[in-house]
Amino acid sequence: MSRDETTTMRKRPLLILGTIASLALFAAAFLNKPTVVACVDLEKVYRSLDQLKAAESKATELRTQLQARVDSLADSVRGMQDELESFQPGSAAHNEAMNKAILKAGDLSALQSFSELKMESERANTVRDAYLKVREACAALSKAQAIDLVLIDDTIPPVTPANLEGTMQQINGRRMLYSSGTLDITDLLIERMNKEFRAANPSFVSPPADGATGAAAPPGKS
């Protein structure tokens, strides 16, 4: 064995020990790093998002359009029912008019069901899309603020009076017992999301503060 090989073999254990020591120091520093935790009032976020206010305005327009179609078809059904009175019951003309009225009434029922399902679907999609945007914005804000973990603050809504089962359901559905107000980033999140939304939608005009926003209820809320 040459002198260089002998020297290399002697240095190898020292290099391994040095690497292990460095990794140990790095791990210790990482473990000693405090975890930064923040909280968000999700209900307040949903109540305050311009994205949801804009979606509710569109939903109102859609609801108006669907209702106009329902009203128009309902008027047709009433007209056909009134027309039946001008025919002799049991006559061919009466039977034909009655069959047409029955078919039209079926169309009305189908349109009413479609309208309800359409509005419910729009509401669900709106809430889901907003939730995904909240997660995306929360991740960006957390990275900017060096926050490691963000929790939904479910200590804010009060436990409403109910029977024992209902009260226990409310309590068991919560995961936090306390959070410091200094950890709350709700307003920062709302400001960030609304700023981004308005930049992407410069024509948006926020409705009055006291306006009802049916789409602004968080998931699972009515």
Image (spheres, rainbow, N blue to C red):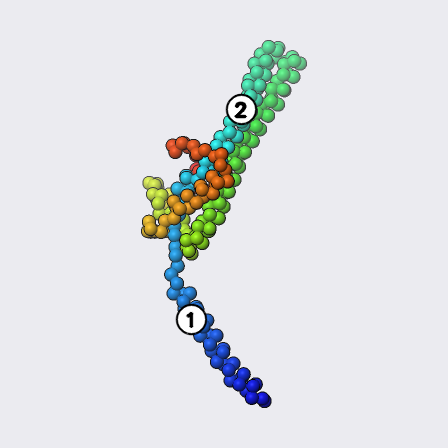
Q: Nearer the viewer, residue 169 or 135?
A: 135
Identity of the residue drawn at 63% across and 16% down: 97
**Residue at image mark 1:** 25
Q: Nearer the viewer, residue 171 or 3?
A: 3
Say which amino acid is labelled 1: Leu
Q: In which quarter of the image is the N terminus?
A: bottom right
**Residue at image mark 2:** 68
Q: Is 116 rendered above or below residue 8?
A: above
Q: Is residue 167 visible?
A: no
Q: Is 200 rendered above or below residue 16?
A: above
Identity of the residue drawn at 40% across and 67% down: 29
Q: Is 104 rendered above or below residue 165?
A: above
> Dot 2: few (<14), some (14–19), or many (≥20) neighbours within 10 Å?
few
Find residue 20 and report its horizontal and vertical position in percent: 47, 74
Identity of the residue drawn at 35% across and 47% down: 155
Q: Nearer the viewer, residue 147 or 180?
A: 147
Say which amino acid is labelled 2: Ala
Q: In which quarter of the image is the C terminus?
A: top left
Q: In this view, does 28 lie to the left or right of 79?
A: left
Find residue 213 and report its horizontal and vertical position in percent: 43, 34
Please report contact status of discs 2 and 1: CB closer than 8 Å, yes or no.
no
Find residue 9 and report its horizontal and vertical position in percent: 53, 84
Q: How many marks?
A: 2
> Dot 1: few (<14), some (14–19), or many (≥20) neighbours within 10 Å?
few
SS class, disc 2 = helix
Looking at the image, is mark 2 or mark 1 nearer the viewer?
1
Could you tell me how far apart the alpha carbons at marks 2 and 1 are, in whole angstroms?
A: 71 Å
Q: Which of 220 and 214 is in front in this view?
A: 214
SS class, disc 1 = helix
Q: Residue 14 carries which label?
A: none
Direction right: furthest residue: 92
Q: Is residue 111 visible?
A: yes
